[in-house]
Image (cartoon, grey):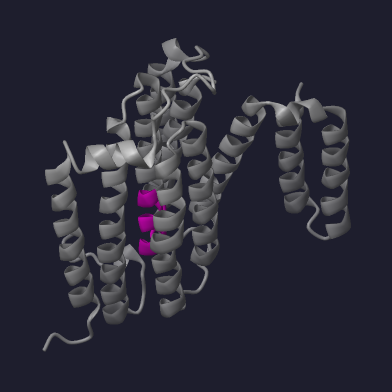
């Protein structure tokens, strides 16, 4: 069972997530794509932990999960606040800091 | 030709029938189903191989990731994201990260995704037309650059491709167990662990304040 298989899958998942962030304008779907990218990175960490037989990668994946939970909570709260003011979750409507 | 490629072709056939013959649901359901049953009967010895299952889970993971990005309805996207998280939990099991697999299902699919589902139901979002208002040029540029990025990543990995790095079964005994992860978390990474708890408290307070109707 080659470790590279998991690395390639993780690379593809990360790419799909980043393209999703770029082409979708719905804030919730963009957050979901960020979760997808975080998971791809986690998979890479765990694959390399298996290759080196060291558990540091597992610890890092654990902390990424923690940060993902915090990010999801704050991000969704921002989406709710945005929806309350603009009645939409389209990020093109939050353009105050756009140049 | 093995079972995995056959089943992937069946899924592609099903998708094509759904797109080009949407008026004939019987054909779209029965024809790929019969082909799949035939393949299972012909190549049933593949079911016992770990490579088949890894490939199948990988295919489902990629497919569900694509559907997260492409589906216009956010609720369906969330369900596919949950499917994707389960696929990654299966990968963790194959890589002998059993604690992380359990955490993935309980924390990620169980808690974080419930938050997403809850917010989508709270906001009662309609399905978008197409993929939203983003301009055509940005979309094509993103897809093009994304393909280039994926090609770059695979190119970087090319000299490693196909080399077997571990045999399922030849493991260090304690690798990936809850005991060892706990020893690391409460030993060498104790400070990071405590910092993560502070981060969670800060995120919780921030989320409550942001989602509050009025601050007074």
Q: Residue sitting at 17 percent across and 71 percent down?
A: B205
Residue drawn at x 28%, y 42% is: B182
| Nearest the eye: B152 or A37 | A37
B179 horizontally vs B84: left or right:
left
Give the percent coordinates (x, y) of residue B5.
71, 28
In percent of width and height, residue A98 lies at 19, 59
Q: At x 48% / y 58%, what residue is drawn?
A: B131
Residue B73: x and y in percent read 53, 65
Front residue of this view, candidates B115 and B147: B115
Is B53 in front, or is B152? B53
How many labels, in total?
Answer: 0
Q: Is residue A27 magenta?
A: yes
Q: Is residue A49 visible?
A: yes
Query: Which of the 4 image quarters holds residue A96?
Result: bottom left
In the rendered view of the protein, which quadrant contains the N terminus of chain B? top right
* Residue B181, placed above or below residue A32: above
Q: Which residues are magenta?
A: A23-35
Above or below, comparing residue B45 to residue B12 in the picture:
above
Image x and y of residue A3, in percent: 46, 22
**Secondary structure of the magenta portion, mostly?**
helix
Task: Report the residue at 22% width, 82% height from top.
Answer: B212
Image quadrant holding the C terminus of chain B, namely bottom left
Q: Nearer the viewer, residue B43 or B74?
A: B43
Q: On the picture, is B166 further left or further right than B181?
A: right
**B122 is within the stretch colored magenta:** no
């Amino acid at each position: 069972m080659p470790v590279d298989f998991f690395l390639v899958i993780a690379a593809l998942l990360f790419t799909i997530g980043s393209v999703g962030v770029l082409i979708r304008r719905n804030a919730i779907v963009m957050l979901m794509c960020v979760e997808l990218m975080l998971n791809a990175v986690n998979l890479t960490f765990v694959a390399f932990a298996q290759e080196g037989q060291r558990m540091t990668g597992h610890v890092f994946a654990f902390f990424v999960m923690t940060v993902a939970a915090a990010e999801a909570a704050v991000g969704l709260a921002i989406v709710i606040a945005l929806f309350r003011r603009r009645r939409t979750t389209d990020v093109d409507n939050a353009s105050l800091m756009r140049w | 030709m093995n079972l995995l490629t056959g089943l992937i072709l069946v899924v592609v056939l099903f998708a094509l029938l759904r797109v080009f013959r949407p008026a004939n649901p019987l054909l779209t359901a029965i024809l790929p189903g019969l082909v799949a049953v035939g393949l299972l009967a012909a190549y049933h010895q593949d079911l016992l191989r770990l490579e088949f299952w890894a490939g199948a889970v990988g295919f489902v993971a990629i497919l569900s990731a694509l559907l997260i990005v492409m589906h216009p309805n956010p609720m369906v996207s969330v369900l596919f994201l949950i499917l994707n998280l389960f696929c990654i939990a299966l990968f963790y099991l194959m890589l002998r990260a059993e604690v992380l697999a359990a955490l993935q299902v309980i924390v990620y699919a169980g808690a974080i995704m419930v938050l997403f589902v809850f917010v989508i139901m709270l906001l009662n979002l309609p399905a978008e037309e197409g993929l939203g208002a983003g301009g055509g040029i940005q979309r094509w540029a993103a897809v093009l650059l994304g393909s280039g990025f994926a090609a770059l990543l695979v190119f970087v990995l090319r000299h490693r491709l196909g080399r077997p790095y571990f045999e399922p079964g030849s493991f260090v005994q304690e690798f990936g167990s809850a005991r060892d992860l706990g020893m690391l978390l409460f030993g060498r990474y104790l400070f990071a662990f405590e910092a993560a708890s502070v981060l969670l408290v800060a995120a919780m307070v921030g989320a409550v304040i942001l989602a509050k109707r009025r601050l007074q």
